[in-house]
Amino acid sequence: MIAGLDVGVGTMRRNEVSRFLIEPSYAYGVMGCPPRIPSNAKVCFEVELLSYTDSTAIDDYQHLSEEEKRDLPFERLVKVSKSLNAEGNELYLCEKFGAAVRKYMKAINTMESATYKSEEEEQEMTTICTKSYLNIGLSYLKTGSFGRALDSARKVLVLKPGHTKAMYLCGKAFRHLGEFPKSRIYLQRALAASPRSKDIITELKLLDQMELNFQAMEKQMCKKMFT
């Protein structure tokens, strides 16, 4: 982002629409941006701020030494992790799945470096890590990395056994990997926990169809072998 736009957007509120006329020194300068933007051109932007993520906690954290990070109170680390997850969600919505995964992993690493002193703090750490691993799993599904999606979903089940969405993700990943019996086991468990879930019901129908297609292909191959 060019300097002038960065400053301008920083003054806006959510859902606000603004126009910024930016001097060359705060835009593209002497070089311009050929062929559309000539040298030393003033530029005008119209911006609508739909959402934003407060990265103050992350910026402060990144400027600390490793020793200072270790000494941070649990509440500060929670704030950093939540901000990292929020940034990951923004990247996910922009379909930048690799960058989103890196943010979610940083959130997990931050929480895993924390020392909790009560059951409540332990539960909060588990909740944040669970959300992060789920989001990682969803991101990997989007990129076709089904083995990694499965690994992430299983990590959720270690933290929270019987987690419905994690079982659904395992079932979906196994289907894509061609492990149909394992897929059905996880999806049926997920459906038992959430009988009205349209996503789970749809996934089971897809599994049924894929199994039928696979069986038909096997029969066709057998016919060719003996003709």
Image: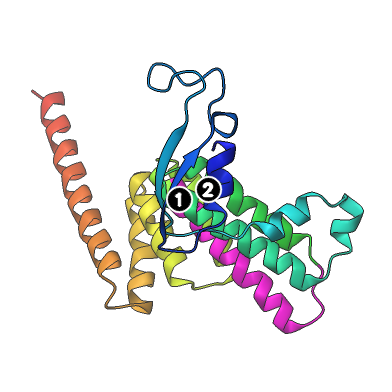
**SS at mark 2 in the image:** helix
Furthest residue to the bottom?
Answer: 119
Instruction: Report the magenta residues as a range.
Output: 115-140
Q: Amino acid at mark 1?
A: Tyr
Q: Which residue is mark 1?
A: 92
* Residue 22, image x, y percentages: 51, 38
Chief SS of the magenta region: helix
Residue displayed at 55% across by 60% down: 86
Quarter of the image with the N terminus is top right
Please give the residue where the numbered disc 2 appears in the rendered image. Answer: 100
Expressed as whole percent of the image width and height from the top left, the position of residue 193 reads: 38, 78
Residue 129 included in the magenta stretch of the image: yes
Question: 78 left or right of 41?
Answer: right
Residue occupying the point 51% across, 41% down: 98
Above-or-below relation of 30 to 8: above
Magenta segment includes 83: no
Look at label 2 and name its amino acid.
Answer: Ala
Viewer-closest of 227 and 5: 5
Q: Quadrant of residue 61?
A: bottom right
Which residue is pictured at 16% across the width and 49% down the height?
212
Q: Position of residue 77 (x, y in %)?
A: 74, 65
40 or 219, nearer to the observer = 40
Residue in the image at 73% along x and 83% along y? 119
What percent of the width, then of the height, locates residue 210?
22, 48
Nearer the observer, 28 or 157: 28
Q: Is residue 68 above or below residue 1?
A: below
User: Helix, strand, or loop for circle 1?
Assistant: helix
Tags 1 and 2 in contact by the CB under 8 Å rule?
yes
